[in-house]
Image (spheres, rainbow, N blue to C red):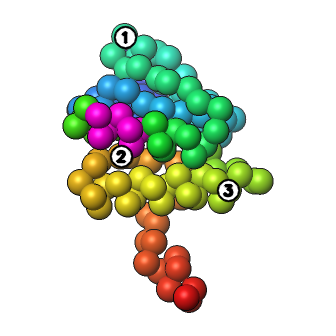
Amino acid sequence: MPRMTGGDAIVDSLLRHGIDTIFGVPGVQMYGLFDAFARNANRLQVINARHEQTTAYMALGYACATGRPAAYAVVPREPLLLIALSARMLADLAARDGRPVVALDLFGDLDLRRAFENHP
């Protein structure tokens, strides 16, 4: 039996949760994930973008237009860290508004309230 990679496990989880379209910007840290996307091209549509924040907007638009959950994948890297962070914030706010957008990034659990509690 072939060994399942982390990317294959993520693809399997996405499909089990009804996500069959993902928006993304490939990056060296996510080559394994994007390889898994390619191996599952018959079950998963990948739409590439050229800007990290755009992927979150595309996923949100897809979720709003179809009523289905959507996902995006980006690598938060310098100097685009704040751009990727704003994309993540959009996904978190969309989910709180009942529009399920899954963020596949390297931020982990992000608590937006704590992130801005010291700012007016």
Please rate how many residues cluster around mark 1, counting C-alpha atoms within 10 Å: few if below 14, some from 14 to 19, many from 20.
few
Q: Nearer the viewer, residue 120 or 70?
A: 120
Nearer the N terminus, badge 2 or badge 3?
A: 3
- 82 left or right of 4? right
In this view of the protein, can residue 13 be seen by the observer? no
Asked whether 60 falls inside the magenta stretch, the response is yes
Residue type indicated by callout 1 = Asn
Tag 3 secondary structure: helix
Tag of residue 114 = none
Please rate how many residues cluster around mark 3, counting C-alpha atoms within 10 Å: few if below 14, some from 14 to 19, many from 20.
few
Q: Quadrant of residue 82?
A: bottom right
Nearer the N terminus, badge 1 or badge 3?
A: 1
Between the C-alphas of marks 2 and 3, the distance is 19 Å
Tag of residue 42 = 1
In this view of the protein, can residue 77 be seen by the observer? yes
Q: Which label sits in the foreground, 1 or 3?
A: 3
Residue type indicated by callout 3 = Leu
Position of residue 25 measured from the top left corner of the image (x, y, whole percent): 60, 34
Q: Compared with residue 94, is residue 71 higher up or lower down, i.e. above or below?
A: above
What residue lies at 56% left-to-right and 58% top-to-bottom?
86
- 18 left or right of 103? left
The part of the chain drawn in magenta is 59-65
Tag 1 secondary structure: loop
Q: Compared with residue 38, is residue 100 higher up or lower down, i.e. above or below?
A: below
Dots 1, 2 in contact, CB < 8 A:
no
Residue that mark 2 sits on: 101
